[in-house]
Image (cartoon, helix red, strand yellow):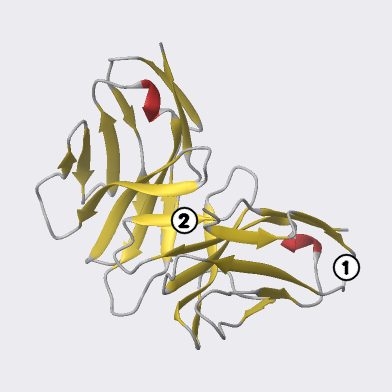
Amino acid sequence: AQTVTQSQPEMSVQEAETVTLSCTYDTSENNYYLFWYKQPPSRQMILVIRQEAYKQQNATENRFSVNFQKAAKSFSLKISDSQLGDTAMYFCAFMKLTDNNNDMRFGAGTRLTVKP
Amino acid sequence: NAGVTQTPKFRILKIGQSMTLQCTQDMNHNYMYWYRQDPGMGLKLIYYSVGAGITDKGEVPNGYNVSRSTTEDFPLRLELAAPSQTSVYFCASSEPVMDTIYFGEGSWLTVV
């Protein structure tokens, strides 16, 4: 069974600084996707960044980047130049790469507060 | 913009009772999901559906049933409620690319 662990229930960062959110996962699969989702109070889960396990290069999306360590089963999210609008819950998620499988496993979430 | 609507928001059940959590979405999404979230834990997938007439078990399906007769509706049925089913339940929908998952506001269920 796949499990996703986020060990930081809450974090805070000053505006314009950099913060890293941790995520580890457990799987015996070799092919899978990893995701970071942002959940503002509106309850929407917005995709921040996605990483395919077969790609060695770390994914980046503007101010967001990941440090994907496949052997260590670690998938941390770095937010650079933090903005007030980054305040939200962040969920790390895992999904196997198989046909018709949408069994996405989420971590417990990290509540990030960006302080002015 | 209604998005994903869940009812009821709060419910107290006695052990052994049954109930249905309703979920409807107005975005014409093919994919719908039911998750439960226990305190301090991540979301756990109960059931999901990739389209009308198609449902599949997730990580924790025992004690639950679903149906998907229309694209819009995805009700979750609890049979013979047990205290272990005390949780917050979230319905969600998305398109297959899963760039954005739209969640309902949650249904707080207590079984006593």
Question: Which of the pair A105/A26 is nearer the observer?
Answer: A105
Based on the displayed image, in which of its 4 quarters is residue A99 positioned? Answer: bottom left
Q: Is residue B68 above or below residue A41?
A: below
- Left or right: residue B111 versus residue B40 is right
Residue A95 shows up from this direction: yes
Residue A27 shows up from this direction: no
Name the kind of residue labelled 1 in the image: Ile
**In which chain is the residue bearing label 1?**
B
- Seen at 16% across and 45% down, the residue is A59
Question: Which of the pair B70/B91 is nearer the observer?
Answer: B70
Separation of marks 2 and 1 at Cα, in angstroms? 31 Å
Based on the displayed image, in which of its 4 quarters is residue A84 positioned? Answer: top left
Question: Which sits earlier in the primary sequence, circle 2 or circle 1?
Answer: 1
Q: Say the numbered circle drawn on residue A12.
A: none
Circle 1 is placed at which residue position? B15
Q: Is residue A25 above or below residue A33?
A: above
Q: How many neighbours does mark 2 have within 10 angstroms: few (below 14), some (14-19), or many (20 or more)?
A: many
Question: Which of the pair A36/B6 is nearer the observer?
Answer: B6
- Seen at 26% across and 31% down, the residue is A78
